[in-house]
Every structure is written in structure tokens, then in C-alpha cells.
Image (cartoon, rainbow, N blue to C red):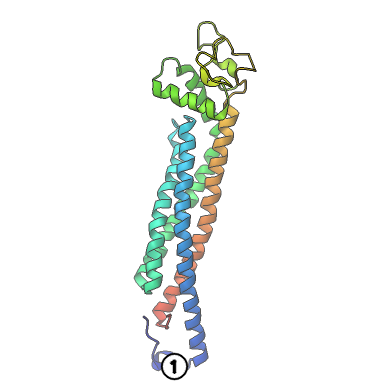
């Protein structure tokens, strides 16, 4: 509990002015507490969004380019840090601790800069998704036959989930079997054993649309969602920093907050 400054400390100040300042400080305190609660939720949201974006990258096998997969990882790390900093800020506001609120402001400022950097990186690499995904999907098709069971399962799951076949079309699987007309069973609309044998051009049995456009759309949506979330949360955090600075000034001045 902060003590009210003595008369000597506020010489010439009117009682009404002091009460107004104290009331404003009290309001800022609870606003800061409320915003920290929002930050806690935002941190949790960043973790969830980062995990979803990373899973989207893994599920589409577009993970060979570290520059792209690093964006969701940065978001996850930032989310975890924000999650704990928000708790720290809540304690500082509740206890009216000048050093805790100062530390909270400094840490939050660093987090805002990191989030802005992640958003910029996500925006920059968003334009390179086409090239990256196209290259990785072509490698996926060429390596399928001689790859491990785990790799094949990942490719099959992608084609099942997205209801697609090959990179641009089912014709990309011409080297899958010697006959040149067979596709993996995961390309089949109704999957049964050897349903893809000799059915490459059969639209009633096999998906004819390639996975490339569907994968790009999925990744683009996830990256855009992460970027928007990072920017919105950064804006809220800037407001929190402003409130923290106002509260620090009130505490330093010695006004009664509670």
C-alpha cells in the first residue's frame, strides 16, 4: 500500500487535484491488471496459432527451408514468454511494485520488437511459399517409391486430407510404377487395396487435381493468420506499456493507488 504524500511534498496542490490523480492512478492500475490478463490469453493464442502453423508445415512436408518453418517457432517462443511476462505484470500491478512494473515494461518492449520482426519475416517469406512448396512437392513425388514407410505415410495422409493427387495433377505419378498409369492408393476417391492401379486418368476413381494449389492456400492462410495475430497483439501490448509507464510515474510520485 502506497502512502499519501505529505503536505510538504505537495505544497500548493489542491485536495481535489490530489484525489483526481489518485483516482486516475487507481484506474490505470486496474486497467494494467486487465490488460495483463488479456496478454495472458494472447500468449496462449500465439502458442496455439504457432503450433497450428508448424503442424501445417510438417503435414505438407514443406519443412526443408528453415527460414519458413522458423516463423511459427518464433511465434510459439514469443507466446510462451508473453504468457509468463503477463503473470509477472499482474503481480507487479497488484503489489504496486515499481521495479516489477519497470521490468515488465522493458521485457514487453523487447517482445513487441520480436513480434514485429516475426510478422515482417512471415510477410517476406509468404511470397516465397510458391517456390518452396513446388520444389518440396516435386521431391516428395520423386522420392516416394524408395523412401521409408514413415515418409510414404506422410505423403499418403496429405493426399487423403487434401483430396488431391500429385503436384499439379495425377499425371505426376507416371514413374510410380512401370506401367506409367498407376498412382498411390491414397489418390483414390474410395480407397481400397490397389485401387490406384491403372487408374491415373480415371476421374471416377482418382482425384485429378494436384496438391500444389491446395497446399499453398493452406500455408498462406496459416501464415496470414499468424501475422495478423502478431500485429494485433503487439498493438495491445504497446497500450499495456503505456499504462505501465503511467502507473510507474504515479507510484514514484507516492500517490495513494489503493
Determine which quarter of the picture holds residue 105: bottom left
Figure quadrant of the C terminus: bottom left
* Element on which disc 1 rests: loop
* Residue 43 in sight from this viewpoint: yes
* Residue 127 in sight from this viewpoint: no
The residue beneath circle 1 is 11
Looking at this view, name the residue that lies furthest to the right: 203
Determine which quarter of the picture holds residue 95: bottom left
Label 1 Cα neighbours within 10 Å, binned few <14 / some 14-19 / many ≥20: few
Image point 45% across, 26% down: which residue?
154
Figure quadrant of the N terminus: bottom left
Q: Is residue 198 above or below residue 209?
A: above
The picture places residue 171, in percent across and down from the top left corner, at: 59, 15
The picture places residue 2, in percent across and down from the top left corner, at: 37, 81
Q: Is residue 2 above or below residue 185?
A: below
The picture places residue 23, in percent across and down from the top left corner, at: 50, 82
Q: Is residue 53 above or below residue 176?
A: below
Of 121 and 59, the residue lying toward us: 59
Q: How many marks?
A: 1
Taking the image as shown, residue 158 lies to the left or right of residue 207, namely left
The picture places residue 47, in percent across and down from the top left corner, at: 44, 48
Of 154 and 116, the residue lying toward us: 154
Amino acid at each position: 500500500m502506497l502512502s499519501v504524500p505529505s503536505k510538504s511534498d505537495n505544497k500548493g496542490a489542491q485536495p481535489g487535484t490530489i484525489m483526481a490523480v489518485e483516482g486516475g492512478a487507481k484506474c490505470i492500475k486496474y486497467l494494467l491488471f486487465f490488460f495483463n490478463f488479456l496478454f495472458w490469453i494472447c500468449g496462449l493464442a500465439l502458442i496455439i496459432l504457432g503450433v497450428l502453423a508448424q503442424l501445417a508445415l510438417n503435414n505438407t512436408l514443406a519443412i526443408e527451408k528453415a527460414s519458413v518453418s522458423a516463423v511459427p517457432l518464433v511465434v510459439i517462443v514469443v507466446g510462451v514468454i508473453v504468457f509468463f511476462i503477463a503473470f509477472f505484470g499482474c503481480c507487479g500491478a497488484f503489489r504496486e511494485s515499481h521495479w516489477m512494473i519497470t521490468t515488465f515494461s522493458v521485457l514487453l518492449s523487447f517482445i513487441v520488437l520480436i513480434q514485429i520482426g516475426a510478422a515482417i519475416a512471415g510477410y517476406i517469406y509468404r511470397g516465397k511459399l510458391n517456390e518452396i512448396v513446388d520444389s518440396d512437392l516435386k521431391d516428395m513425388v520423386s522420392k516416394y517409391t524408395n523412401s521409408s514407410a514413415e515418409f510414404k505415410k506422410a505423403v499418403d495422409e496429405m493426399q487423403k486430407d487434401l483430396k488431391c493427387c500429385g503436384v499439379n495433377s495425377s499425371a505426376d505419378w507416371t514413374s510410380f510404377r512401370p506401367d506409367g498409369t498407376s498412382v498411390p492408393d491414397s489418390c483414390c476417391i474410395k480407397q481400397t487395396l490397389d485401387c490406384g492401379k491403372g487408374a491415373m486418368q480415371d476421374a471416377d476413381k482418382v482425384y485429378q487435381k494436384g496438391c500444389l494449389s491446395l497446399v499453398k492456400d493452406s500455408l498462406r492462410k496459416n501464415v496470414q493468420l499468424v501475422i495478423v495475430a502478431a500485429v494485433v497483439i503487439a498493438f495491445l501490448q504497446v497500450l499495456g506499456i503505456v499504462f505501465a509507464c503511467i502507473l510507474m510515474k504515479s507510484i514514484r510520485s507516492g500517490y495513494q493507488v489503493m
